[in-house]
Amino acid sequence: MTPSDFVAFPTGNLCNADPRVQALPPALKPLIPGKRVAGRALTVRITPGQNGAIHRAVHSAKVGDMLVVDGGASERFGPFGDLLADGCMAKGIAGAVFDCTIRDSADITALGFQVFCRGFHPEATAKTERGETHIPLVLGGVEINPGDIMVGDDDGVVVIPKDAAGHVLTSVTAVAAREEDIRARIHAGETTLDIFALDP
């Protein structure tokens, strides 16, 4: 099982599959609409206005990782730009999640590298603080541990605990099959009121 096994499934299906799947705050929006990505959490914590730890994390990354950065929900500074995005792609990083703003959004979009973030801000950052990498994070009340599976699409980003990933993959496959059955019944003339046996 690899993170790419989860790319076939919308985040909504994943949330239906298991209550251990948790969604990050809706303020984290996708840079590239229509592009779903999945990867293993490569976690980073920075002080707003710093980005040294991001460079260290990208240096240590493995193919299939997803960069996840706790930027303190800052709406200033651009700790991630096109050069780091190029570096991520060269390392085989699947995408990135920033609980803060980034910059060079147009150039990153042109590269095709998917980022989820709070928006954009051009202000420069420094590299005078080391920051932290490969540590547990809490974003919007959701715990993220290194190696957890991250999946992001137009609806947002979800976290699948690594010890639940196998069960979630099995369960979401069943969820997707059930939805196809429901869709076929709707096209055959039933309504969702009938299908879910709800009171009229």
Image (cartoon, rainbow, N blue to C red):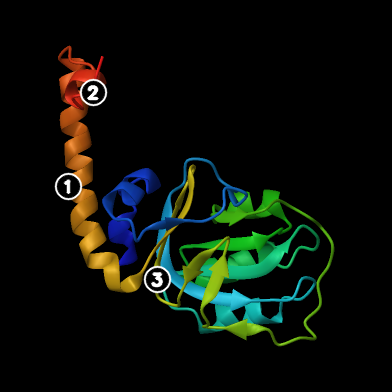
> Mark 3 — residue?
148
Distance Cα–Cα, label 1 vs label 3: 21 Å
Compared to residue 136, the image places residue 32 above or below, namely above
Residue furthest right in the image? 123
Counting from the top left corner in percent of width and height, residue 7 is at 34, 53
Toward the viewer: 91 or 14? 14
> Mark 1 — residue?
174
Crowd tier of the residue under label 3, counting other residues whose Cα lies within 10 Å: few below 14, some 14–19, many 20 or above: many
In the image, what residue type sits under mark 1? Ala
Instruction: Mark yes or no: residue 80 visible.
Output: no
- Residue visible at 24% across and 19% down in the picture: 199
The disc, 1 or 2, on the residue closer to the chain's N-terminal end is 1
Element marked by disc 1? helix
Instruction: Mark yes or no: residue 70 visible.
Output: yes
Crowd tier of the residue under label 2, counting other residues whose Cα lies within 10 Å: few below 14, some 14–19, many 20 or above: few
Compared to residue 181, the image places residue 78 above or below, namely below
For the C terminus, which image quadrant? top left
In the image, what residue type sits under mark 3? Asp
Circle 1 or circle 2, nearest the eye: 2
For the N terminus, which image quadrant? bottom left
The disc, 2 or 3, on the residue closer to the chain's N-terminal end is 3
Distance Cα–Cα, label 2 vs label 3: 37 Å
Element marked by disc 3? loop
- Residue visible at 24% across and 51% down in the picture: 172
> Position of 2 compared to 63: left or right?
left
Compared to residue 4, the image places residue 9 above or below, namely above
| Label drawn at residue 198 | 2
The disc, 1 or 3, on the residue closer to the chain's N-terminal end is 3
Toward the viewer: 195 or 113? 195
Counting from the top left corner in percent of width and height, residue 159 is at 42, 62
Distance Cα–Cα, label 1 vs label 2: 22 Å
